Image (cartoon, helix red, strand yellow):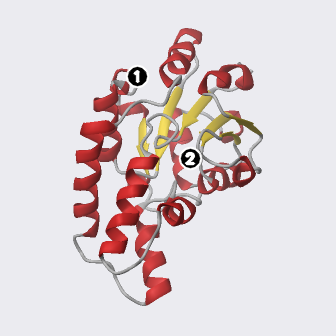
Amino acid sequence: MRYELVIFDNDGVLVDSEPLSNTLLAGYLTELGHPTSYEDSLRDYMGAAMHRVHDTILERTGQRLPEDFDEVFHARVFAAFERELQAVDGAVEVLDKLRADGVPYCVASSGSHERIRVGHRKTGLDAWFGEERVFSSQDVGRGKPAPDLFLYAAERMGVAPQRCAVVEDSPLGVQAARAAGMDVYGFTAMTPADRLRDADALFADMRELPELLG
């Protein structure tokens, strides 16, 4: 394998959380008087940190979301995770192969550390991700499409950016990886391929990833 580090996005790449969280986000925003469809939520917020939701609503409406917005939203999301969340099909097989081949890997997510951990415990992925392999936008202050998170993860893992491969399923994540100077592989299981066209390669089945990585 030609990479010294594989950096995974979390939501939609390792855990199948995007349908759950975007359904809940669209519903909560609509409930608060900001009509938002599921498709709107995917388009505007998929792959983003929570500050993007606040910034977008303020920019569009001049109104601020409630101070407890994040707390209420995450409570709803975590409850849904406990009921329904599953690992992305094929993710365990890919992690097993990376481990067997001795290829370092980590996760770098726009979600909070708590969100990552809740999802990993529910799906059993915590067996592959110790604390030293988990990075969140909380660690850097700016989420994707800024490159900060990916650069931070690479630095902490001791690998130069140009030796890293990023696995992403959102346009914001692809932009962030590009800005960080990393190769990026676009996972199209639920994202239209044309929205990830700036990736180095596209794939729809997680089991295809090891061959793509070389």
Q: Residues within 10 Å of mark 1 (few under 14, many from 20)?
A: some
Tell me how many marks there are: 2
Q: Residue at x 68, y 49 (%)?
A: 192
The quadrant of the image that shows the N terminus is top right
- x and y percentages locating residue 57 in the rendered image: 44, 79
Residue for badge 2: 150
Residue most toward the top? 100
Identify residue type, mark 2: Phe
Q: Residue at x 39, y 27 (%)?
A: 129
- Residue closer to the observer: 98 or 34: 34
The quadrant of the image that shows the C terminus is top right
Residue for badge 1: 128
Q: Residue at x 45, y 76 (%)?
A: 55
- x and y percentages locating residue 154 in the rendered image: 56, 39
Q: CA distance from mark 1 to mark 2?
A: 19 Å
Q: Earlier in the sequence, mark 1 or mark 2?
A: 1
Q: Residue at x 66, y 20 (%)?
A: 210
Q: Residues within 10 Å of mark 2 (few under 14, many from 20)?
A: many
- x and y percentages locating residue 188 in the rendered image: 65, 41
Identify residue type, mark 1: Trp
- Residue closer to the observer: 155 or 1: 1
Residue most toward the bottom? 62
**For residue 167, above or below residue 125:** below
Q: Is residue 128 left or right of residue 177?
A: left
Report the mark closest to the observer, 1 or 2.
Answer: 1
- Residue closer to the observer: 181 or 8: 8
**For residue 24, above or below residue 62:** above
- Residue closer to the observer: 152 or 119: 119
